[in-house]
Image (spheres, grey):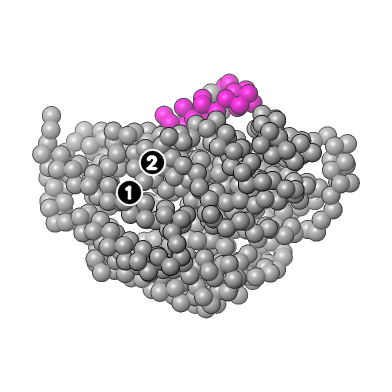
Amino acid sequence: MHFRPYDELLARAYQVTLLGGAANVLDWDQQTYMPLKAALTRADQLALVRGLIHRRATAAPIGELLKACEDHGFEPGSDEAANVREWRRDYDRRVRLPQKLVEEFERTSTLARVAWAEAREKSEYVIFQPYLEKILQLTREKAEHWGYEDSVYDALMEEYEPGIRTSEIKKLFAQLRPSVIELFKQAKASDFTRKSLAGHYPIAGQKALNQAVAEALGYDLQAGRIDATLHPFSLNLGTADCRITTRYDETDFTVSLYALLHEIGHGLYEQGLVAENYGTPVGETASLGIHESQSRLWENKVGRTLAFWENWFPIAMNYLPEVARLSPELITRAVNHVAPSFIRLEADEVTYDLHIILRFDLELQLFESQLDAADVPAAWNEEFEKLFGVPVPHDRFGCLQDIHWSLGSFGYFPTYTLGNLNSAQIFARARQECPELDHQLGKGSYRPLLHWLRQKIHVQGRRYLSQDLMKFATGESTQIHYQMEHLRQKVLNPLLEPDTTAAIKANEKESYVRSTPEPARAG
C-alpha cells in the first residue's frame, strides 16, 4: 500500500542522492586527475552543485511531507520508519544552514585542498594557514547554526557519528591513552621493522598485486576502480560505482597494499548496500565509526596476519620478484612492527590511536578558542613529542600530512578510533558465530567473512544508529577490551622462533625512528 507523502519523499530523496553522486564525481576527479589550474573553476562548480543539493534537500514541502509521514506512522522497525526518522534528522540539520554558507564553505574547501597539497609538498604551513583560518571560521558558523548543548564540538561530531558526544570521546580517550602508551613501551624493544622490506618494487607490479588482492577479497572491479592519489580515499558515486585509491612507494610495496586493504574495506561496505534502497537512508552507511570498522578489519585483522602472507607470498613474488628474498614470517613481523611513525597512515596498530588522540586534542583546542591556527605546527610538534618521544622534523610529517582539515572535516578523526574498537569487536563476534572462520581465512577464503559482514552490517544501512547497530551485530555497544586484547596478543606473542629473529636482527640495523619515505605523486 502506497502512501503519497512517503512516495513523494522517496522521489525527492532520489534526486538529491543523484546530485550528491554528481558532486562526488567532481570531488573524485579533483583528487585524482584534475589539472592544477582548474581549481578555481572546480571550486565554482562544486559550490554550485552543493548549493543545488542544499536547496532541493531543504525545500519547504519536504518538512510538510515529513510531518505527514510522522503523523501517519509506520510499523516500528520497518524500512519506512527508519527512512522517515533519518530523513527528519538530515532535514533538521540541513535547514538550519543558510544557502550562502553552504556554497561559501564548498568553494573555500575546494581551494583549500589545492593549497594543502602545495603546502604539504613544500612543507610550508604558511601556504595553508589562511585557508585553514577561513575553514575554521565557516565551520564555527555551521556549528552555531546547528546548535549544541555542551561543546561546540558536539555539533561537528554529529555530522559523522550521530549520537556520540565530546564528553564520551574524552572519557574514552582518557581510558585508552595510558593503556596504549603502556603497551607501546612493552613493544618498543622489537627487532622487526619495515626497513627489512626495503627494495625496488615497480609500481606496475604493485598495481597487479593490488588488483589480485582486491578481487580475492570481493571488491567488484566492474562496479569500481583503483586509482592513485596523494591521500588514499574511497568515494561512492552511485549504486555500482564505488571508487577507491591508494598511493605508491617503489621502495616499500606494503605502503600501497595496506592503503588499498583499508580502502577495500570501505569499498566492500558501499558495494554491500542494498541497491534497491539507493537514495534512502536504509541504502546508506550507518556512520563513519562503522565505516572505519570495515576498513580497519580488512586491513589489520585480516591483512596483517601470518595466514594472509602465507597465502599471498608466492603470488606477490610473481608480480614483484624482489619479494622472493623475504618470507611470509618476515613480512608479517615487519608490517606489525611497533615503533613511532610520523605518518598516521603508516602507523602500527598499537600507536595508531595516539595519532587520533593528538588530532582530537588539537581540534578541541581550536574550537574552544584555546589555540590559534598560526600556532598549530608548534602545538602539534610539542604534543607529538610528548606522545612518541621524538621530534617532528618538518610540517609535511606533522600537521600537513592529513587532508581532512582542508576538507573542513572537523569532528571526523575520533571516528577512526571508534572504527578500531568496533573492528576488533565485530571480528571477535564473527569468529564466535562462524567457528570455521579462522580455517577459511587461513586458506585464503574471504567470502564467508564478507557474507557475515553483509548480513550483520552492510545490508542494515542506516536502519540503526551506530551503537544500536553494534548491539545488533555483536550483542553490545562499543567496548575497549576487544581491541586491547587484540593488541596485547599481537605485541606479547611473537610469531617467529628465536633463531629466525636472530637472523633478521643480524641483517638489519636502524635507528629507533624510521624515516618515512615520501610516496609517489598521484598520476
Report the side of 397 relative to 426 (left or right): right
Alpha-carbon neighbours of circle 1 within 10 Å: few (<14), some, or many (≥20)?
A: some
Instruction: Classify residue 28 as left or right of residue 342.
Output: left
Of the pair 255 and 262, the residue shown nearer to us: 255
Q: Kindly tell me whether residue 87 is visible in this rendering.
A: no
- Taking the spot 66% from the left edge, 29% from the top edge, the residue there is 311
The residue identified by callout 1 is 21
Q: Quadrant of residue 443?
A: top right
What residue type is disc 2 on? Asp
**Among numbered discs 2 and 1, the one appearing first in the sequence:** 1
In this rendering, is residue 298 above or below 167?
above
Q: Secondary structure at mark 1?
A: helix
Tell me the residue that label 2 is attached to: 241
Can see residue 33?
Answer: yes
Mark 2 Cα-neighbour bin, 10 Å: few <14, some 14–19, many ≥20: many
For residue 159, above or below residue 192: below
Q: Which residues fall within the magenta stretch?
A: 435-456
| Picture residue at 36% right of the left edge, 63% below the top | 42
Counting from the top left corner in percent of width and height, residue 283 is at 32, 39
Q: Secondary structure at mark 2?
A: strand
